[in-house]
Amino acid sequence: MIVHLALDGAAESALGVGVDIVGSAARLVEAGLVDPATRKATLRQRVVSLDGLPVRSGAGRMIAVDGPLELRGLGRSDVLVVPGVFAATESSIAQLLEREEISRAAALLAQASAKGMLVAASCSATFVLGSSGVLDGAEATTTWWLAPAFAARFPAITLVADRMVVVTERGGRTSPVLTAGSAFAHADLMLAILARIGTPSLAKLVARYLLLDERTSQTRYMILEHLRVSDPAVQAAERFAAANLGRQFSMNELARAGAVSPRTLARRVHAALGMTPNEMVQRLRVTRAGHLLATTRASVEEVAGQVGYADAAAFRRVFRRYAGESPRGHRGAEEESALA
């Protein structure tokens, strides 16, 4: 059984795509189009709320549910998944986590995990999962623009902010915990769940039928300017890096700009942004390069030099890693957008 827990303020798109992905998988199994090893019982699903009453979505519409969340009778073969609740800012996350129903949901997620259920969450619901304690000492991802808030609130969790879906498995737990990025990453989350409880071929077939592309990273969507932090050392290091992107500089120089040791800078950058200082610098270089590719006719090699890369091949590799596409592909997409 796959149980979708709808909280008040839930994103209709995430909940809907989750239900549609499971429903499509069930129909493909019934049609005999996939590996018969996939159990039909696994693909039964329910949409529930904490009390069994309809919930109001983030768009203000009422969402009907099949009943209340009841863990009795559920176990290792079952899944509890929580779509995100709309929360665009750190203050809205704080308000979300102060709600009494969120505390109840976090406690139930902890109980479900203790029973051996696979538990999963996307977008802001990853904060609910973080509050449950089941991710302590493990890795997780979250919606990219709330990464600093997640890292600050849950220091016991290793944040991998650029991943679309993170699967956490630790010794002693037979069922994993899955986290995913922002709202439409819920589709990636549900496909990852299908691959685990069914077969990878089932997940791939559903993705093909629903025209869902495979996406492993949030990096191409991340905008560093939206990850602003209050730590003065990190701010100073970022300003230094932005002013010196045209050359290579050492981590010692970066740390001196922040008036801290390299080790302290690494710790504070990770706490603030969920990444290493080197990753922060690379993102700044790629952001600047993307702007130059979109607004100038400079060649890829010239752009590489302007953002500190003597080796254009190395620049292309880094750009693809953080932007999710090649420099030429990025320029082509920007030109098409300008003509649209």
Image (tube, grey):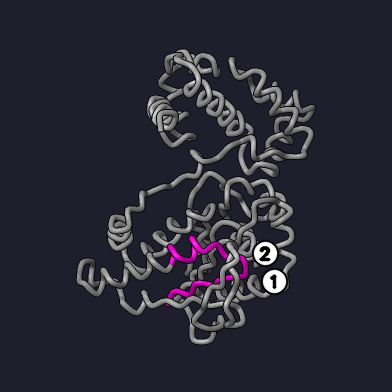
Q: Position of residue 323 (x, y in %)?
A: 47, 34
Name which residue lies at 72% across and 39% down.
Answer: 229
Name which quarter of the figure residue 77 lies in: bottom left
The numbered disc on residue 131 is 2
Rendered view: 248 above or below 99: above
Side (left or right) of 5 relative to 21: right
Residue segment shown in magenta: 1-18
Q: Residues within 10 Å of mark 1 (few under 14, many from 20)?
A: some
Side (left or right) of 114 relative to 131: left
Q: Position of residue 30 (x, y in %)?
A: 24, 75
Side (left or right) of 18 relative to 209: right
Find out whether the residues at labels 1 and 2 contact each other: C-beta distance under 8 Å.
yes
Name which residue lies at 71% across and 28% down.
Answer: 237
Give the structural element (helix, strand or loop) at label 1. helix
The numbered disc on residue 103 is 1
Residue lying farthest bottom?
73
Give the quarter of the figure containing the C terminus: top left
Q: Number of marks in the image?
A: 2
**320 magenta-colored:** no
Q: Nearer the viewer, residue 88 or 113?
A: 88
Side (left or right) of 51 relative to 262: left
Give the quarter of the figure containing the N terminus: bottom left
Name which quarter of the figure residue 267 lies in: top right
- Amino acid of disc 2: Ser
